[in-house]
Amino acid sequence: MDSFFYSYIKDIVEHDLMTKFFYKKIKDIPVFKKVVLCFDYKNPSYKQILNSILALNVIGNQSNVTLLLLKKSNVVLKLRSGSPVGCKIILKKLKMLAFLSNLFLILIPQDKNFKGLVINSNIKNTISFNLKSLSLFNSLRDQYVLIKDLNSLSVTVTTNSKNLSELIFILKSLKFKLI
């Protein structure tokens, strides 16, 4: 884990949150809870599903990838219920902080297509965005055959913030681009 990122969150971001929002307890300070990485497909082949499972294993440094199955049949797409339509992985604690430090410090500044994040005012504690270029990950850069057929990676970061202003303040303190 990147100790700089962890110490930056603990020392600077949490102190700024305490001074801005006047929390009475340290437990009230919003923190990151989990990160969900997901590949979704409308009409996937088994090769895409297997490649996305392998890519998530490499990206998340975990082997507990969950396969997403279709709940209802879709006649238009010619899919039966129970057929795989994607996969996801949930990162928590140390692996989550390692992924977030890699995301905020390396991947997002390198991505030329990432113009910023649009915040949905209905959601108060999650941010979701897509990473279209999977070649930004150093571990996947050498394996072009694996990532050439994959869709964009959907990233969902969940916090325990109580309102939207806390979430925006956390993102701005981490120098995340907002539109």
Image: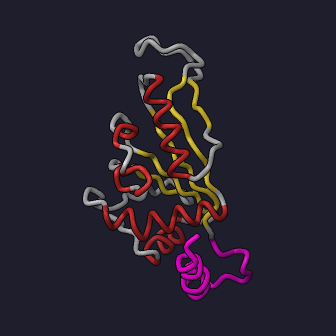
Instruction: Judge from the rendering whether residue 131 lies leftward or rightward of residue 62; answer left or right.
Output: left
The mark total stands at 0
Instruction: Judge from the rendering whether residue 174 lies leftward or rightward of residue 27; answer left or right.
Output: left
- Which residue is the extreme one toward the left? 112
Which residue is more in the foreground, 40 or 61? 61
Tell me which segment is drawn in magenta: 1-30
Residue 156 coordinates in the image, percent (x, y): 51, 52
Magenta region includes residue 29: yes
Which residue is more in the foreground, 38 or 169? 38
Residue 136 coordinates in the image, percent (x, y): 35, 56
- Which residue is the extreme one toward the front? 142
Does any portion of residue 16 appear in the rendered image? yes
In the rendered image, which quarter is residue 83 located in?
A: top right
Does any portion of residue 21 appear in the rendered image? no
Most prominent secondary structure in the magenta stretch?
A: helix
Above or below — where is 166 with respect to 118?
Answer: below
Above or below — where is 127 with respect to 15?
Answer: above
- Picture residue at 37% right of the left edge, 60% below the top: 117
- Picture residue at 34% right of the left edge, 47% below the top: 132
Residue 167 coordinates in the image, percent (x, y): 52, 67
Residue 61 coordinates in the image, percent (x, y): 58, 53
- Picture residue at 47% right of the left edge, 23% below the top: 46
| Quadrant location, the C terminus | bottom left
Above or below — where is 152 with respect to 18?
Answer: above
| Quadrant location, the N terminus | bottom right
Magenta region includes residue 15: yes
